[in-house]
Image: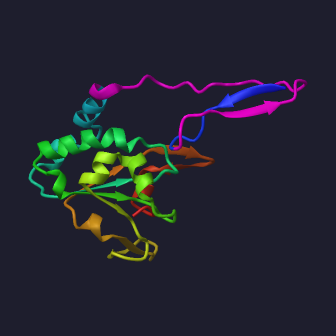
Amino acid sequence: MQEIFVPWAAWYGKAPFKMEFPDHWEVAVHHMRGGPDIGDAGIRQALQETIGAPPLREFARGRSSAAILVDDLSRPTPAFRLLPYVLEELAAAGIGADAVKIICALAAHRPMTRDDLVKKVGLDIVDTMQVLNHNAYENLEFLGYSSRGVPIWVNRDMTSCEVRIALGMITPRGGMFGGGAKLLIPGA
């Protein structure tokens, strides 16, 4: 029997998944080519040298509140690693942690539990900041209609903030992409 170990369970441990194949099967393993970890300096640089927009610190300056949308555990975005840098930039612009709401943009997914939230955004953030699950049926604000006449309702906690940030990932899915703008619609 041939054994291949595949990484999986990103949020529930790093133990690989063992797959077994008969010896007479020809099995080839193609490893993903990942890039190097950009590290702390790279994250800071990305927030300060933005593409097509002013740096976050500059954009947020003079504003008093912020909402940060994050995806749930169905996406591997390491929000726990990125949020401290985003919060640092907001603080430098004059928006303290007490004026920031972190909103889990769930779309039709189940609400995140406390354990889920700790995995996603980190224990310190869960214990010290306002972290909310979006509810698709409550606390919504009507923004109007799309060009096709579809009513647009979004999370009121998000619309009540002057700075709105989507912190997620973009991933290919068949003939389209997931993530990105979907953090807002249908996410929140």
How many numbered circles does the render carry?
0
Q: Is residue 121 above or below residue 164?
A: above
Instruction: Answer with the quarter of the image where residue 83 lies.
Output: top left
Q: Is residue 59 above or below residue 6?
A: below
Residue shown at 26% from the left, 41% from the top: 84
Front position in the image: 147 or 49: 49
Instruction: Answer with the quarter of the image where residue 20 lies.
Output: top right
Q: Examine the residues drawn in magenta and state their main secondary structure.
A: loop
Q: Is residue 35 above or below residue 58?
A: above
Q: Position of residue 110 (x, y in %)?
A: 51, 64
Q: Position of residue 136 (x, y in %)?
A: 43, 71
| Residue 128 appears left or right of 23 | left
Q: Is residue 165 visible?
A: no
Does 152 lie within the magenta span?
no
- Where does the magenta region start and end? 12-41
Residue shown at 24% from the left, 53% from the top: 128
Q: Position of residue 80 (x, y in %)?
A: 36, 42
Does 23 lie within the magenta span?
yes
Q: Position of residue 185 (x, y in %)?
A: 43, 62
Residue shown at 38% from the left, 77% from the top: 138
Front position in the image: 21 or 105: 21
Please state, as top left, top right, bottom left or bottom right, where the C terminus lies in the image.
bottom left
Q: Is residue 118 visible?
A: yes
| Residue 12 appears left or right of 118 | right
